[in-house]
Amino acid sequence: MNVLVINAGSSSLKYQLINVETHTLMAKGICERVGSAQAFHKHGLDENEVVIDAKMANHDDAMALVLDSLVSGDDAAISSLSEIDAVGHRIVQGGKYFDRSVLIDDDVIAKIDELAELAPLHNGAALMGIHACQKHMPGVPMVAVFDTSFFQTLPPKAYMYPLPYELYEKYAIRKYGAHGTSHRYISERAAAVLDEPLEDLKLITLHLGNGCSASAIDHGVAVDTSMGLTPLDGLMMGTRCGAIDPAIVPFVMEHENLTAAEMNDLMNKQSGLLGISGVSNDLRSVRSASEEGNERAMLAYDMFSNSVKKYIGQYIAVMGGVDAIVLTAGVGENCEKMRRMIFSGLQPLGIVLDEEKNRHRGFERIISTDDSAVQIIIIPTNEEYMIARDTYEIVHDQEVGISAQ
Ligand code: ADP
């Protein structure tokens, strides 16, 4: 089954065409700056990627370009759109409605729309992607895969905020989490690497990219996660502040004369590594600057590792122990120096990084010492594969159900 995976952002549309049975990535690309005069489209499998300046007034135009690029040219991935069997959409916010991936119908679309209040940029963009697919590929089954559904298992003591209860009743203000597809994937893969059932393990999963999140996964069930009502909470990130004293918000708004939208922008786009270092949101640039003696860059580096360390401690306490700590995404997979800083001093907790293994490059791998009580594992994340797999399973089950009737 060929599944087209769509990840629509407010001004972008990422896609991959995956054959789920053979695990083959057939095509991939991204349309960026959709809706602006500088829109462009990158298409191809890494080394032979083609960049095309293209006019895209909206996601509908972008979708038309994507579908055209899949079937045209000498190296076309497929000869006709009829070879796309199903579409899987990444949806950021599934609220309380979705604890798993679902087949998209009118009711699902209405709920995604209703939830857009909690994730205006993301759910709105996903809906544009869904409508564009409906238009260009009528009748092809579509599945919604939610970033939040993995965290619907959190107990109320973890997802409630200690605010007046009426705010929860009125606005559904609670923790929903994000990056759930990534945490689900790396927890499954970590169990495979350890050759133990996921149901027997206590895991802490760390997605450390531009956006960062940590999760506690107790015997296969997510029991806590660092992102909250929105992806702003929790760990320090590239441009997001993560958890701060909430009283800072009205203080800065009053003293800097900022609107709510401006304050939101400051915390989401001008904070984190960028805000502290003044250099960049990109950890590589912050590292270079810190190695050249830039003190603010050094501070940003220290704060980032300390922020991750604190979540490790919290989640050990939440689960009453941990068997493995799993790292993924740009920083988690690639930055040996950050990993060294995160795990330094954790030996008394039975967490011992192997300096040599930490330096190795590679795919899925264990980087703790042989006698470390807690394993440290690197798993490159693959959210697109999870979306394709969920789509395959749901569409396949539906087809089996129909043919049995
Ligand atoms: P996104 O959340 O945008 O998907 P990524 O998972 O690509 O982000 O992670 C981006 C982050 O990973 C950046 O801060 C980047 O500097 C960092 N990164 C990528 N490669 C390396 C590396 N080799 N060393 C240190 N940091 C790296």
Image (tube, helix red, strand yellow):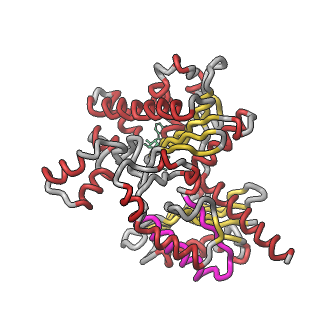
**Quarter location, residue 274:** top left
Q: Is residue 8 visible?
A: yes
Numbered label tally: 0
Q: Say left or right for 296 vs 168.
A: left
Taking the spot 70% from the left edge, 40% from the top edge, the residue there is 198
Relative to 182, does residue 401 appear above or below in the rendering? below
Q: Quadrant of the N terminus?
A: bottom right
**Looking at the picture, how far across and down is residue 89, in whole percent?**
58, 66
Taking the spot 38% from the left edge, 33% from the top edge, the residue there is 287
Tell me the magenta residue range. 120-146
**Quarter location, residue 2:** bottom right
Judging depth in this view, the residue of 200 and 27 nearest the camera is 200
Q: Quadrant of the C terminus?
A: bottom right
Q: Is 301 inside the magenta-drawn segment?
A: no
Judging depth in this view, the residue of 140 and 286 nearest the camera is 140
Taking the spot 56% from the left edge, 43% from the top edge, the residue there is 223
Relative to 158, does residue 25 appear above or below in the rendering? below
**Quarter location, residue 293:** top left
Q: Say left or right for 97 vs 363.
A: left
Q: Is residue 47 visible?
A: no
